[in-house]
Structure formats: structure tokens, C-alpha cells
Image (cartoon, grey):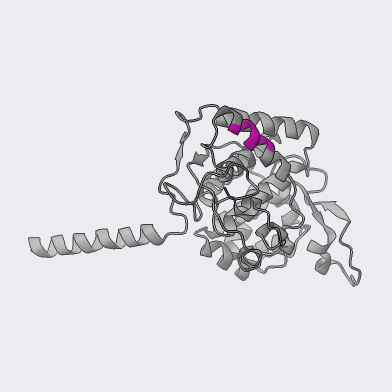
Amino acid sequence: MATGSKFFLSLFLQLLSILFLFNPTNAQGLKVGFYEKTCPKVELIVKNVAADTMSKAPSLAGALLRMFFHDCFVRGCDGSILLDSPTNQSEKDAFPNLSLRGYQIIDRAKAAIEKECPGVVSCSDILALIARDVVAARNGPSWEVETGRRDGNVSIITDAFQNLPGPGFNISQLITRFQQKGLSVEDLAVLSAGHTLGVSHCFSFSNRLYNFTGKDNTTIVEMDPGSFSTFDNDYYKLVTKRRGLFQSDAALLDNAETKAYVELHATQKESFFQDFGVSMLKMGRIGVLTGTQGEIRKVCSKVN
């Protein structure tokens, strides 16, 4: 009996180890305060850059939050979205990423940090921190960000097409894409509310316009009209009224779990704020490089 118990215990531990190793949100090596001894002012520096940016260009809050999302869903949260390509073949050159803005803000934060503690802080961690800080600066929640990521060396344009959820996705496609990244149906409902910040180009939702035949790539609209520069729960109020901008917004009403979350949090901002921090923490663990993996880039737009 004792031998049998030991066998099953050993088998159980091995299974746990396998699940941990292959979990897409495996965050081994990340922790809050990773730079406490090596670069103690890093979070203050990023916060100051975020605050200054929000005072001058508040519309960049949504752009920087979206940049972090797009980074994590492609190759994991490794800063690959920031890399340039001399042949325009990196992630940022993919059509879904052409409207991303705010790269200069990441560069500015990186330059300030390099002066304080050169070669220590990754660009991927800066992106994670600034996403939190711009949300907080626009009256949204704040949360503790785990750090310790290292930067990837690869950025491929086709990876963006294969991994990013599109604005025209239906609910089944959205759930599948999120689950592929280790995120739950609730995480989908929570993180979709990032659309409460920022603007979108017409081509992202033109398929929802009646009898639309034009090719307008320049017109921009507020994703959360009247509240696009404030982080709040108004997004859910719009979705419940079937006034979400994208097909992917409207799709949240096509699943019992996401619909229930939307309807509940159209009136409960505080619990949504708590959930948003939790889901951002989970997303920030996707496919991270830690330890000796990757590198710490000197300049965020190119490998060392």
C-alpha cells in the first residue's frame, strides 16, 4: 500500500511539473519588485514618463495599453512588437499593428532608465509597467506588475496575423484565441474593456456599417464615445445597448458567461477594476523569457 501511494504521488508530481512547463502563462522568474536592488527607481521613472505623456497626449493611453496586449499575444510578452525591420517584416509592420502609436514613449522611458541603471531593465518590462501606469493615470485601476522579463530577438510579421484576435472575430474565435494563450472566458470579457480607452480607424469596423462600400483608412472614431480618454466601465454600458464599435465587442453578448459579466459590470465598476488588474497580471505572464533567455536590449527597437 505504501509503495502504491508513493508511486501515485510521484506520478502526480510529474504531471504537475509537465503542466507547469507547458502552461503558456508560466511565469517562473517573474516577481513584483524584481529590480528592487538592481534598479530601485525603475517604476518611478516609468510612472513619471507616463504621467508626463498623459498630460500632453492622453489619447496615447489606449494606444500603449493596446501595444502591450499585441506584444503578449504574439510570441509572448517579450517586447517583439517594438523591434524594427529593415525590410518591414517585423510584427509592427503587420496590418493589425499599423495603427499602433506610442513607440517613442517606450524609447523615452528606456533612455531615462539606461541613464540610471544601464543594461538592467528589459524593454518588455517597461511596456508592462507603462501599460499599468497609463491606465491608472486615466482614472483606472492600478495593480502590482511582475517584472523580470527579458527581451526576445525575433519579430516576424506573419506571427501577428496568426496570433492576434481580430475586431471581426465571433465569440467562438475569441474564446479559442484567448484559451490558446492560457486566458479564460472571463479574462476575455475583462480585457475586452480595454476598448474603453482610445480610438480606432474606420477600416477596423467598416464591415458593421450598413451598405458600406468605401475604403476609408484615415477617419478615426472614439471607441468609447464621450469617455474615450477615461478608464471606466462605460464600455460595458455601450455593449449592453449593442453599441460596441467592433464585431468582437458585440460578440460578448453571444455567450452566456461573457454576457453575464458584461451586464453585471455595466453597473459595478469597482469589481471590474479589481478583475482588470488580475487579468492584466495573467496576460503579462504569457510566454515570458526569464533567467538567461533572450537579452536586455540597449535600444528597444533593435537587438543588441
Height in image: 147 above or below 41?
Answer: below
Foreground of the two, 274 or 47: 47
Residue 150 located left or right of residue 51: left
Foreground of the two, 211 or 123: 123
Answer yes or no: is residue 250 visible: no
Q: Position of residue 191 (x, y in %)?
A: 62, 52
Q: Residue at x 64, y 55 (%)?
A: 70
Q: Residue at x 69, y 57 (%)?
A: 92
Height in image: 38 above or below 25?
Answer: above
Foreground of the two, 194 or 164: 164
Q: Position of residue 49 (x, y in %)?
A: 68, 32
Q: Quadrant of residue 174?
A: bottom right
Height in image: 180 above or below 226?
Answer: below
Q: Residue at x 59, y 59 (%)?
A: 74
Q: Quadrant of residue 250?
A: bottom right
Answer yes or no: is residue 41 visible: yes
Location of the N terminus by quadrant is bottom left
Q: Position of residue 187 (x, y in %)?
A: 56, 54
Specify the segment rendered in magenta. 108-114
Question: Principal SS element in the magenta part?
Answer: helix
Residue 137 located left or right of residue 123: right
